């Protein structure tokens, strides 16, 4: 009888071990196999980093220590050693870019990525395993994982104009993106309610346009109250955040809001706006928030601004917005009307297209590609290199692809996280009540509407966090 009791005890213990190894990884890996055994991390564990990953060494060291309580020894180079945790790049792997494999055996741990970002994705999976409730601290279950992303573009946006978030908060946001293997941080740096990036050729954009309140050029808004509110990032701040993001496998795409949503600009430099006899309002009720398309000096100013952006943001795309432009202002502006007459235009969408074709040339001049919201494809053709962000709905993404543009699907009905998650929650409702189930239900590629070749133009999916309602913690 004692023998049977002992066998049952061993069996139950084995079950507990198996259950303890169950993992919930987000996103779910493409392939995962587990065994009911664990690798015990040595107290003097060695982390071996490929030379191509060395810029992330401090990040990997700090996260490893925080999640395991073990201070590792780090070596740079392609070395092999038992009981070590190795992070290697193998560009010849038969796996999509940013993919990785993670192998945990009795000999140690091997994270192998097709690229540096692939290795970092594998490291994020390792961190999730460390933090799982079912995993005993200081151990790693035996697993074999193969994982890779479906899309090359996996982005998330943050609006820092309506509410200003300090540098550390932005870094925390990037940490969350990296933890979920998202590789693009879309930084919405300018809007009607605040200009947040230092431009040395135009200091008043931040000295004046970075603040709102009594006596400021911008009125209080979005809960900022009857006090001076705002802030901005110096160019050194930006460089620091860019470096921080790259160490975690995240690229930063900056956005400058033009030609609309520009009240912070025209309040700081009134000459940039149109001179009209009658004020018209934007969708959000703002007046004088549009760049004058007919003022030739404005293109020289934009050239200077875009040059400074490209000097501190190495990412290949520059987002120039183009959404919700109050084109009625142009209809009353003599300079804008003069351009329309000269070019033979019959509506202001054509004038908007004229503006963005000129902006494309400026962006390309600094070896970058243009990106913009889906409205910019109206009024005429743009460069096929220009990437479109379809925010108004899925049909706008289809239209963009049909016109030959690389497209990111970011429909507000599914991916805008400023929407209320329930009927009782604070938040916008114009797109939908957007709960987790609805977000997960979104399919970025409308297969029935696009050919296989057209589907390839959908580069990925992105979420957005606009900050109108972020003045309160809930």
Image (cartoon, helix red, strand yellow):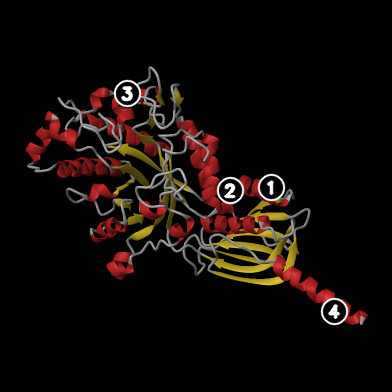
Q: Earlier in the sequence, mark 2 or mark 4?
A: 4
- The residues tagged by marks 1 and 2 sit, at their Cα atoms, a distance apart of 16 Å
Disc count in the image? Answer: 4
Q: Earlier in the sequence, mark 1 or mark 4?
A: 4
SS of the residue under disc 3:
helix
**Within-10-Å neighbours for mark 4: few <14, some 14–19, many 20+:** few
Q: Nearer the viewer, mark 1 or mark 4?
A: 4
SS of the residue under disc 2:
helix
Q: Nearer the viewer, mark 1 or mark 2?
A: 1
Look at 40% across and 24% down and name the residue there: 212
**Cβ atoms at labels 3 and 2 below 8 Å apart:** no
- The residues tagged by marks 1 and 4 sit, at their Cα atoms, a distance apart of 38 Å
**Cβ atoms at labels 1 and 2 below 8 Å apart:** no
**Is residue 106 in view from this perspective?**
no
Residue 268 circle label: 3
Q: Is residue 393 above or below residue 350?
A: below
Q: Which residue is mark 2?
A: 56
Q: Earlier in the sequence, mark 3 or mark 1?
A: 1
Q: Which residue is mark 1?
A: 66
- The residues tagged by marks 3 and 1 sit, at their Cα atoms, a distance apart of 45 Å
Give the farthest residue toward the front.
Answer: 424
């Amino acid at each position: 009888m004692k023998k049977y009791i002992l066998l049952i005890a061993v069996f139950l213990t084995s079950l507990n071990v198996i259950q303890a190894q169950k993992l919930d990884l987000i996103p779910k890996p493409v392939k995962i196999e587990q065994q009911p055994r664990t690798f015990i991390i040595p107290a003097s564990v060695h982390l071996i980093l490929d030379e191509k990953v060395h810029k992330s060494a401090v990040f990997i060291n700090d996260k490893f220590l925080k999640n395991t309580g073990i201070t590792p020894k780090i070596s740079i180079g392609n070395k092999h050693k038992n009981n070590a945790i190795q992070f290697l790049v193998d560009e010849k792997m038969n796996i999509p870019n940013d993919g990785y494999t993670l192998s945990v055996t009795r000999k140690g741990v091997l994270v192998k990525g097709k690229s540096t970002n692939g290795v970092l994705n594998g490291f994020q999976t390792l961190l999730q395993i460390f933090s799982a409730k079912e995993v005993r601290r200081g151990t790693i279950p035996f697993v074999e994982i193969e994982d890779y992303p479906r899309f090359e573009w996996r982005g998330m946006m943050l609006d820092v104009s309506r509410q200003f978030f300090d540098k550390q908060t932005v870094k925390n946001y990037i940490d969350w993106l990296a933890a979920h293997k998202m590789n693009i941080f879309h930084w919405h740096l300018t809007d009607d309610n605040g200009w947040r990036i230092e431009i040395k050729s135009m200091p008043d954009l931040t000295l004046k346009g970075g603040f709102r309140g009594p006596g400021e050029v911008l009125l209080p808004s979005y809960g900022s109250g009857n006090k001076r509110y705002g802030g901005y990032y110096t160019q050194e701040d930006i460089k620091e955040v860019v470096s921080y993001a790259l160490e975690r496998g995240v690229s930063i795409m900056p956005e400058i809001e033009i030609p609309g949503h520009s009240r912070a600009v025209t309040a700081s430099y009134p000459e940039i706006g149109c001179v009209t006899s009658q004020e018209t309002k934007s969708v959000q009720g703002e007046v004088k928030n549009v760049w004058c398309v007919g003022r030739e000096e404005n293109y020289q100013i934009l050239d200077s601004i875009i040059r400074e952006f490209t000097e501190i943001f190495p990412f290949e795309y520059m987002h120039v917005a183009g959404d919700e432009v109050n084109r009625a202002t142009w209809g009353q502006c003599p300079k804008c009307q003069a351009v329309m007459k000269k070019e033979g235009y019959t509506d202001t969408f054509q004038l908007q297209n004229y503006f963005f074709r000129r902006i494309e040339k400026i962006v390309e001049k600094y070896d970058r590609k243009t990106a913009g919201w889906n409205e910019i494809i109206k009024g005429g053709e743009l460069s096929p290199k220009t990437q479109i962000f379809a925010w108004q709905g899925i049909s706008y993404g289809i239209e963009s692809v049909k016109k030959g543009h690389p497209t990111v699907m970011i429909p507000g009905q599914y991916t805008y996280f400023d929407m209320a998650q329930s009927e009782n929650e604070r938040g916008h409702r114009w797109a939908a009540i957007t709960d987790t189930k609805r977000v997960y239900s979104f399919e970025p590629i409308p297969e029935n509407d696009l050919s296989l070749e057209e589907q390839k133009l959908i580069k990925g999916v992105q979420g957005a966090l606009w900050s109108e309602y972020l003045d309160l913690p809930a």
